[in-house]
Amino acid sequence: MSDRRYPTSSLAADYCRAGVGLTISAGPLIFLNPITAVTYVLSPLAILFGLFACRTLLRQMTRYEVSGTGIRASGPLRFEVYWSDLENVELRYYSTRLDRGRGWMQL
């Protein structure tokens, strides 16, 4: 069995983005008394950045276990996928350079 999780160092940038977004959007709503039009613009942004911060926290708290029977995520949101239940798996590579030397994969 193999245990995997997101390292805190790789999530630090997401935490910074969520903090800056919440400061810019929720800060004026909390500390100032903005006009209604500004409130309608900043409120959805504050909710969006709050959800992003929650999702980043869930990533940090989740541990993934890969075994011979399947993949299991344990943490606040738990799920399990058995290898026998999979019918199709696709792996795609997205290159960020013309020589296809760098990029990322999506499973």
Image (tube, rainbow, N blue to C red):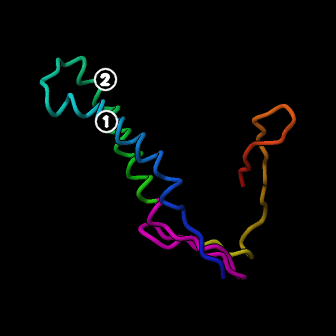
Asked if marks 1 and 2 touch (Cβ < 8 Å), the reply is: no
Q: Which mark is residue 46?
A: 1
Packing grade of label 2 (10 A; few <14, some 14-19, many >=20) is few
Residue 53: x and y, percent?
A: 38, 48
| The one of 20 and 59 positioned closer to us in this rendering | 20
Q: Residue at x 68, y 80 (%)?
A: 67
Q: To which quarter of the image does residue 1 belong?
A: bottom right
What residue sits right under mark 2 in the picture?
A: 41
Q: Secondary structure at mark 1?
A: helix
Q: Report the side of 48 relative to 102 (left or right).
A: left
Residue extent of the magenta highlight = 59-79
How far apart marks 1 and 2 lie (CA) works out to 9 Å
47 is higher (above) or lower (below) than 91: above
Image-based side of 10 in relation to 24, left or right: right
Residue 19 location, x and y as percent?
34, 41
Q: Measuring 41% from the left and 57% from the top, which residue is drawn there?
A: 57
- Quadrant assignment for the C terminus: bottom right
In the current view of this chain or complex, which residue is farthest to the right?
99
Q: Name the residue type under label 2.
A: Val
Q: Amino acid at mark 1?
A: Ala
First in sequence: mark 1 vs mark 2: 2
Q: Quadrant of residue 28?
A: top left
Q: Residues within 10 Å of mark 1 (few under 14, many from 20)?
A: many
- Using the image as rendered, state which of residue 103 and residue 55 is in the foreground: 103
- Residue under the point 44% across and 66% down: 61
